[in-house]
Image (tube, grey):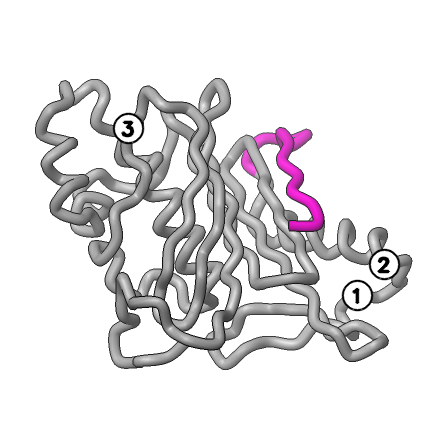
Amino acid sequence: MDWVIWGRKETEGKTGIWSKEWIYSMVACYYGKQNIQKLIQRTKWNKPFLVLDNGKQAYFNYSHTKKYLLAGFSEDADVGVDIEEIKRGHRSVNLITECLASEERKYMKTLDKSKQREALLKIWVQKEAIGKALGIGLIYDTSSFVARYKADVHRESFQIAFGNRELIGQVWREDDFWACVTQAYRIKQKTGALGKEKGRQEY
C-alpha cells in the first residue's frame, strides 16, 4: 500500500460526493495532475482505477462516515477500505449477522448484547473492505471465511486466499470507530478458494 490516510471531516455530515472529490484531489496532488478525471477508468463492476501516463494502473478506494473519511492508494494491487463509527454505525445488526460465518456466530453468542455491536462492526469492516478490494462489493459469499472477530483485540493483520486472489490487510480500532484496509493480489495458481462470488468462478 503506497499510502493510507484517515481524518475527521471539518464539517460533520459532508456527503459522499464531497468524499469522492476529496480523494480525487489527493490523487491529483500525488501525481501533480490538474484533472485526474481524465486518467480514471472503470471496471465492469464500475470500480474506478487510474491509467497512468506510462500505461501502468493505480488503485484507490475510500469510505466515509458522518465524521470520518478513510482512503487507500496503491500501484501494486487493488485496494479496499471501510470505516464505521461504533456509536453511530448505520449498519443494522440483523444485516451484519446474515454475513457471519458459523465460527463468528458462535462467538457472538458468548458476548453481552452491549458488546455485540462493536464486535459485529469489526467483522463488517473486514468483509466490506474485502469485497471492495475484489471489486465486486458484497455479492460474494461473506460467510465463507472467518474474519478477525475478537472485539477486545484492537489491531490485527490478516491474509486470506480467495479464488485467484490473495488478500492482505489490517483491521484496527480508534477511539470511536473500526476501520480496515486490504489489498487483493492476483496469484498465478489458485491456492484454495475460501469463498466464491455468487454467479462467477473467477475474479
Q: Is residue 203 left or right of residue 1?
A: left
Dot 3 falls on a residue whose secondary structure is loop
For badge 3, the amino acid type reads: Lys
Determine the residue positioned at 72% across, 56% down.
24
The dot on residue 19 is none
For badge 1, the amino acid type reads: Ile
Q: Quadrant of residue 202?
A: bottom left
Q: Earlier in the sequence, mark 2 or mark 3?
A: 2
Residue 197 pos. (x, y %): 30, 71
Q: Do the residues labelled 2 and 1 touch (CB within 8 Å)?
A: yes
Residue 192 pos. (x, y %): 30, 67
| Up/down of 30 relative to 120, above or below | below
Q: Earlier in the sequence, mark 2 or mark 1?
A: 2
Determine the residue positioned at 36% across, 23% down.
153
Residue position marked by numbered label 1 in the rendering: 36
Residue 130 is a magenta residue: no
Please provide the residue range marked out in magenta. Answer: 1-13
Residue position marked by numbered label 2 in the rendering: 31
| Up/down of 47 relative to 109, above or below | below
Q: Which of 22 and 76 is in front in this view?
A: 76
Q: Quadrant of residue 107?
A: top left
Mark 2–mark 1 Cα distance, whole angstroms, equals 9 Å
Dot 1 falls on a residue whose secondary structure is helix
Residue 164 pos. (x, y %): 41, 72
Q: Kindly report which numbered mark, 2 or 3, lies closer to the viewer in this rendering.
A: 3
For badge 2, the amino acid type reads: Tyr
Residue position marked by numbered label 3 in the rendering: 150
Determine the residue positioned at 51% across, 70% down.
186
Mark 3–mark 1 Cα distance, whole angstroms, equals 40 Å
Q: Which of 84 and 5 is in front in this view?
A: 5
